[in-house]
Image: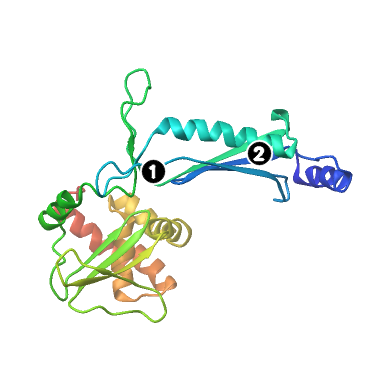
Amino acid sequence: MPWQELAAITTKFRGTGVSALPLLLGIDIGTSGTKVIITDEDGSIVASATETYPLRTPHPNWAEQDPRDWWTATVAAIRGACGSGGVKAADIGCVGLTGQMHGLVLLDEEGEVLRPAILWCDQRTAEECRWITGAVGSGIVKPGAISVTVGTSGVVFAYMDEPALDAEGRLHTFCHTVPGKWHAMGVTLGAGGSMRWFRDTLCEAEVAVGRCAGIDPYELITAEAAQGVTRPQRVAAARSGLAQKHWQRSVSDGRVGP
């Protein structure tokens, strides 16, 4: 249904006491309890309910819950919200679900719970974590050492002897795994995606040359960026001298034939 028709229907029924659109039901299975909220299409709350469950700590630093408690609380909270709001199951048009952070739930072949879930806030592996952080790393453990990782996101990680704060909030400062040291980290969530958009939108010449020469177009883009060339210069370079340079290098490397 076009949005114009949908808007017209909403306007017709708004204020008449009749719901123009199905209601929305949200379920949040949290660490302290399950919260359920029912809203209309405008986001106005129709009803809500919360059912709590225990957080078990059988030993110091342990944090566990019975996954069956989550299910029981979810059912009870949904029934409670629907009951208090006079909402029928047929009135619900959409269900949204969110849960607490990462946790370990062990199931058998029949899907039955084997033991209490180990929650995200469990601290029983502190000693193992100290061992891992001491044994595994990327070598960023001295001044001047920096790592850069570009994937879907982009991360720059730099070692520091002393903590330094970015007044503009662009960098994060954390304790290093090396005792008494620090690291600064900058993150963008769209690094790889942004680079691909740049390649596909503005670098058609580099893509074409790279395809013909068997070269990753990102190599051409990176080389041009290092030279500080402008877009017209990039296009010209990709079609002439720079492309020839990379073609010759590809031939010498054996990646393409002469």
- In the displayed structure, would residue 203 be above or below residue 37? below
The disc at residue 81 is 2
Image coords of residue 92 (percent x, y): 69, 34
**Residue behind mark 1:** 55
Image coords of residue 133 (percent x, y): 16, 56
SS at mark 2 in the image: helix
Picture quadrant of residue 49: top right
Image coords of residue 150 (percent x, y): 31, 58
User: Does residue 34 appear anywhere in the picture?
Assistant: yes
Looking at the image, how many numbered discs can be counted on the residues? Answer: 2
User: Does residue 38 appear anywhere in the picture?
Assistant: no
SS at mark 1 in the image: loop
Nearest the viewer among 103 and 152 is 103
**In this image, 19 relative to 148: left or right?**
right
Q: Please, which residue is most extreme toward the left here? A: 135
Residue count near mark 1 (Cα–Cα under 10 Å), binned few <14, some 14–19, many ≥20:
some
User: What residue appears at the point 16 percent right and 72 percent down from the top-left corner?
Assistant: 180
Residue count near mark 2 (Cα–Cα under 10 Å), binned few <14, some 14–19, many ≥20:
many
Image coords of residue 234 (percent x, y): 38, 69
Q: Please, which residue is most extreme toward the top here? A: 110
The disc at residue 198 is none
User: What residue appears at the point 34 percent right and 76 percent down from the top-left corner?
Assistant: 228
Q: Amino acid at mark 2?
A: Ala
- Between the C-alphas of marks 2 and 1, the distance is 23 Å
